[in-house]
Amino acid sequence: MAAPFDLKNDGVVVIIGSGAGGGTLGNELAQKGIDVVILEAGARHEYEDFINDEWDSFAQLAWKDKRTTSGDWRVAKDFPNLPAWIVKSVGGSTTHWAGASLRFQEHEFKTLSTYGKLEGANLLDWPVTLAEMEPYYTKAEAKMGVTGTNEWPRLPGNNNFKVLKAGADKLGYKECHTGNMAINSVERDDRNSCQQTGFCFQGCKWGAKWSTLYTEIPKGEATGHLEVRPNSMAIKINHDASGKVTGVVYADKDGKLQEQKARIVAVAGNSIESPRLLLNSESSKFPHGLANSSGQVGRNYMRHTTGSVYAIFDKPVHMYRGTTMAGIIRDEARHDPARGFVGGYEMETLSLGLPFMAAFLDPGAWGRSFTTALDHYDHMAGLWIVGEDMPRAENRITLHGDEKDEHGMPVADVHFDDHPNDTAMRDHAYKQGSALYAAVGATRTFPTPPYPSTHNLGTNRMSEKAADGVVNKHGQAHDIKNLFVSDGSQFTSGGAENPTLTIVSLAIRQAEYIAKQMSTKTI
């Protein structure tokens, strides 16, 4: 039974956000007997409440608060007030994700050493290595039920995968399979196995896909050491004269401001909201925002180099049946500068429902070419490109000078320009994806631009030296010992892989560190 904690209890760890990072950290600490309060801006929707309809699900789960955009990215033109799709609900983006769970490769922790200095890119080696992360990857895979690990079988391939695999074979790709997915392929953890009913992004109504909403959080609550407060929007982090953080001011469900006192604060609100909160917590002691002596808070925003390729075939495919991300090709994830870019990318099957396909195939388009494509929706196969984009100091989250939200907090402005490396990688991926489908008889192929729904990373990066980033190898702020970052914003670089497994692994590792520091009274 979750125990409610008093607002004046200054012995608790306050975590802001309940997704892959925050929800995992909360449970891990609670299992160690540490009292935790999670503040979640969104409501609590249990999995039986999920809606298998794309737009209605979006209305239920998405963070729809206004943002502004700038930069040359296509998203700024198509979706200027919704540049990134994140979730505002208990469980965060683990309620709305495909489930792909991949380990980073060794070179991706050493981008500066491997790629060298790249003009226009703010490359930096991570302060952790793959070898250090491997035990935590193993723990995360076991916790999440990742297929293809721990002798759990991979999920079956749907028609969309069968088309992908046939094309991969024709192009000579060797590493093509149904993925490493945090979706039960067998009954485990008191949850169903995958029933292949589709609508995987919209929240899994079977509870087969891992989500902190119905795994980590209930387990943490059962200890009596975890309280989750939905509809609690963090506004500002307070500190004392020495600079130590002391509590979090948040707006409750009625819009009334409350302050939860804290021994430790961990920020896990996503790569847009986390820097927004730190920047909004400025004071005379921290005039540029909390943990920002380096000036790096909000900088190095990454969202992966993405795009999609869809193809039409003579025979029906029905790509929307079965899991959304039903297969992957990993051959192009290697680092091979001979292709004209550093880093690599994955190709992952992707199906959008008809409403989303109409919205995202070519935003703003109309006419015969567009309508005939939609007419052949049931004959379509599709894949998504996800590759390592370059961190750039200029790509950043800032506070808008005039626009404020309902609580009077400045909205986030999201600035992003593609690096030439990103463009070269995307063009290569479009070419390979089109060739793959052409090789198996596609009658039409069409690359589509990046969606607003993607992986948000960076903005509070890890670094060895305080001058280069915001947090150390444990996600602990360089400037403030009892302030942590626990989400994807701590990524030093983005890798080619979907980030959730790494976020969860870092949270498990961080919980160990926090517990040790608390027991020795170092923090």
Image (spheres, grey):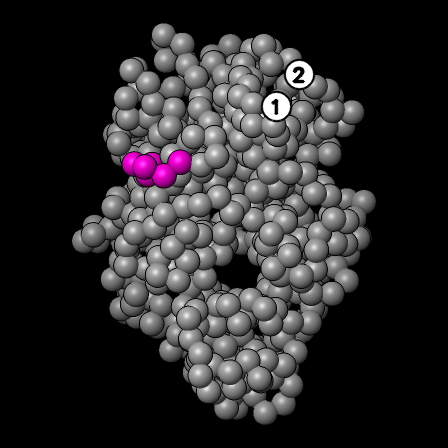
Q: CA distance from mark 1 to mark 2?
A: 7 Å
Image quarter (top left, top right, bottom left or bottom right) of the N terminus:
top right
Does residue 276 sit above or below 120 in this rendering?
Answer: above
523 vs 416, nearest the viewer? 416
Is residue 137 magenta-colored? no
Does residue 220 sit above or below 149 in this rendering?
Answer: above
The image shows residue 335 at horizontal and vertical percentages of: 35, 61
| Nearer-N-terminus badge (1/2) | 2
320 vs 185, nearest the viewer? 320
**492 relative to 261 in the view: left or right:** left
Is residue 386 something one can see in this rendering? no
The three-letter amino acid code for the residue at tag 1 is Val
Q: Residue at x 38, y 55 (%)?
A: 80
- The circle drawn on residue 37 is 1
| Neighbours of disc 2 within 10 Å: few (<14), some (14-19), many (20+) | some
Is residue 252 something one can see in this rendering? yes
Q: List the residue tagged with mark 2.
A: 5
The image shows residue 252 at horizontal and vertical percentages of: 59, 26
Residue 128 in which image quadrant: top left
**71 relative to 495 in the view: left or right:** left
Report the span colored magenta.
399-404
